[in-house]
Amino acid sequence: MDNQNELHMEQQVDIIVIGAGIAGSACAVQLAGMGYTTVLLDRKAFPRHKTCGEFMSPETLEMLAYVGVDPFAFQVEPSVMDSAKIIMPNGGEIDSALPGKAWGISRYELDMMLHQKAIEAGASIVTKAMVLDIVQLDDHSYRVSVRQGKDVVHYHTRSVIGAYGTPRPKFVQGMEIDVPLDSEVYVGVKSHYTGIKTEPRVELYFCEGGYVGISPIEGGEKANVAALLPLKTVQRIGKSVSDILQAAAQDNEKLSVRLSTGVPAPGSQVSIAPVKLSTVPEPWSIFPHIGDALMVIPPLCGDGMSIALRSSIICSTVTDRYLRSEITYDEWQSEYTLEANHHFGKLLKRAKRIQKLAFAKTNRLYPGAAKLFPSLASYLVKATRLTEMGIQR
């Protein structure tokens, strides 16, 4: 013991999942359901509001059903969306039908549902847990040291899965990411609003270098207002989430009008530390990464929930084969890396191209082009989304 108040303990488990958001929780649901002793760690407490668009695309719903989460079984009724509207700073608009039904569910509710499913599957959830160190041993197993309250627990585990989001923690080895010096740094903010009358659609308002999204969430009585904005823009405004959203609205008159009808819901304001968007997916360090730890998508590719769930499904499948000794450690790494790059590499490239075009000075011309070529709007919606997997459980 380091001192009389600190207790060091050892535990043997099959899987440690670091990060209890969508990706980590869904991964824990699947692996615990396969019979593996699974511990889901997070440095913060749950439930809590999180920075997120809270938009669940049709492919997201397919994957949510795959992991066994039915909101209606939890008495949560999601809002339904069937279209998207993009509103430019000059007032021009682009409308498009979504390629299927989408839902609006707050992260507060979604995380609670996923955690309940993980517990039912047999996973242990430990929050307010700070990972101190991860060491890979000669047999490719891991020793994970975690501070839990006054105690330090040393987990000896067969596998680790990183779902800790962004920014990436210092304890991870092999994570020296080559990010261009001129990469834009963004800040995400979110607040729920009451009083904003919503239609069954997601609205994206362009402003200086970023966007603000408005969509209905469960029950339809509140709207989620989420923004991803350049750090340099936010630094000129201040630290209040409401002030940041109101200032962003000054670049888009129609957004300003929309926000003026609503009132921020107390306690729902959150922000995320400055992040740089990914240039390529990063599937592996000394263990697999899923969700935002795998890649941070550009603003217009508002399908983070889908990427979180898809990566958890892919990772769980390959990890199961590794734990059953069907494949070696090197094959575990190579197969997951190959699958992750296959599913997300092209999506990231398309989203980056579309984002560059979206914020070009010529973007005022796009609404007119969309009217002349209706298929253009549909392409923009589909190009930044994953395709459905056709999976069943």
Image (cartoon, rainbow, N blue to C red):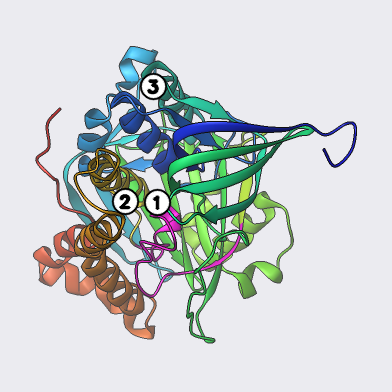
Q: Relative to 316, say whether 47 is above or below.
A: above
In the foreground, 119 or 225: 119
Predominant secondary structure in magenta? loop
Whether tag 2 and tag 3 are in contact, CB under 8 A, the answer is no
Residue 290 sits inside the magenta stretch = yes
CA–CA distance in space, label 1 to label 2: 6 Å
For the C terminus, give its image quadrant: top left
Q: Relative to 344, say whether 214 is above or below.
A: above
- Whether residue 262 is visible to the viewer of this picture, yes or no, is no
In the foreground, 293 or 106: 293
- x, y percentage for residue 28? 39, 33
* Residue to which mark 1 is pinned: 291
Mark 2 Cα shell of 10 Å, populated few (<14), some (14-19), many (≥20): many
Q: Relative to 119, say whether 157 is above or below.
A: below
- x, y percentage for residue 320? 26, 39
Query: Residue 129's quadrant in the figure?
Result: top right
In the foreground, 174 or 380: 174
* Residue to which mark 3 is pinned: 117
Q: Amino acid at mark 3?
A: Lys
Query: Residue 66's quadrant in the figure?
Result: top left
For the N terminus, give its image quadrant: top right
Q: Of the numbered discs in the image, which one, if any, rests on residue 307?
A: 2
